[in-house]
Image: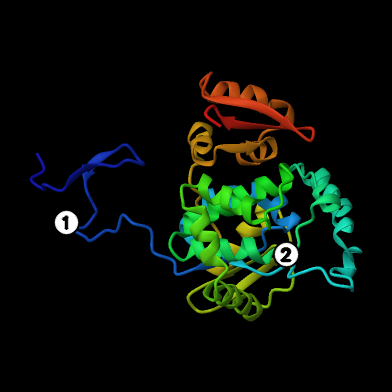
Amino acid sequence: MNENNNMICDLETGICGVGGEKEMEMIHFNQPIKNVDLYYVTDPICSHCWALEPVLRRFVEQYGNYFNFHTVMGGLLEKWGDGPVDPANGIAGPQDVAGHWREVGEYSRMPIDGTLWYDNPVHSSYPPSRVFIFIQQYNEQLANVFLRRMREALFAFNQNIADESILIKIVNQIGLDGQAIVKEAELQSGHLLLKEDFQLAARLGVRGFPTIIIVNEENKGVKIVGARTIENYVAGLKQVLSIDHLPQKQITALSDLLEKENLLFSKEIEVMYDLKKSDMISFIEQELTPGTYQVKEILGELYITSQEK
């Protein structure tokens, strides 16, 4: 019998014998920490940002362990004036936005109503942006939940998120004191915080929304403008990390995702789980327990909510 105690069965060859490995070595189970920052420059009333939600959610879900995620407010609409606000898209006044939004909604299949632009237009995206940043100072994760709830209210359910009462209601829904926070956000400190975001967006060279900028520890990065496919963002991340293969995390089960988000549109489920539109209903029936969810429809698109909503 071989007196060498270094006997192992090789996992790859299936052969048992004298091991060739060192008697003892240091190993690291944790992935190397990558000092990478992702800046998502956006605005609460940006329709193309709403269209990006399904792809962005999946990207963060599968690759978020490689970067620190930062949401930055860009300031899309300070106020309506006498001149055109967005000449490139033919937008001179509030009513011009409605048609543009409808096109984005139809193309992306993220529901957009937009009729509020005729009778109750958003006068500025700055008030909701200030509330977002105020919450972000204390809890970035909760601030992103607030941003999502605002967009649901605005795009799908046609509510004016520049209205103080709507903002208070949404803040209350995420478990905070809406009256106090909305009031605090309108103080000078709230205006200064928003100005700091604008300055950061300018330093990053942002000229439109959505823009995603990924920067590594050497201060080198990539800028991806507009709502793109997940492949674009993965390629950008690989470039910043100087890596060819990027292992991805397993996608969260639909039941856990719904518990976290409370509301998911059909397009979001399709993108997250690589589904055809026609397979969405059968998928949720397979994945979710009866009585824990509801299927609803708005603007020709299905969505699911937690039963308690």
Determine which residue is flagged by label 1.
Answer: 23
Q: Residues within 10 Å of mark 2 (few under 14, many from 20)?
A: some
Q: Nearer the viewer, residue 227 or 1?
A: 227
Q: Dividing the picture into quarters, in which one does residue 71 lie?
A: bottom right
Q: Position of residue 96 (x, y in %)?
A: 89, 58
Q: Nearer the viewer, residue 161 or 53?
A: 161
Q: Earlier in the sequence, mark 2 or mark 1?
A: 1
| Disc 2 + disc 1, Cβ < 8 Å | no
Indicate left or right for 35 with 225 as reference. Answer: left
Q: How is the image coloured?
A: rainbow
Q: Residue at horizontal 51%, vertical 48%?
A: 172
Q: Amino acid at mark 1?
A: Glu
Determine which residue is flagged by label 2.
Answer: 124
Which element is circle 1 on?
loop
Quick one: quadrant of the C terminus? top right
Q: Position of residue 241 (x, y in %)?
A: 52, 67
Query: Where 188 sits versus 151, above or below?
Result: below
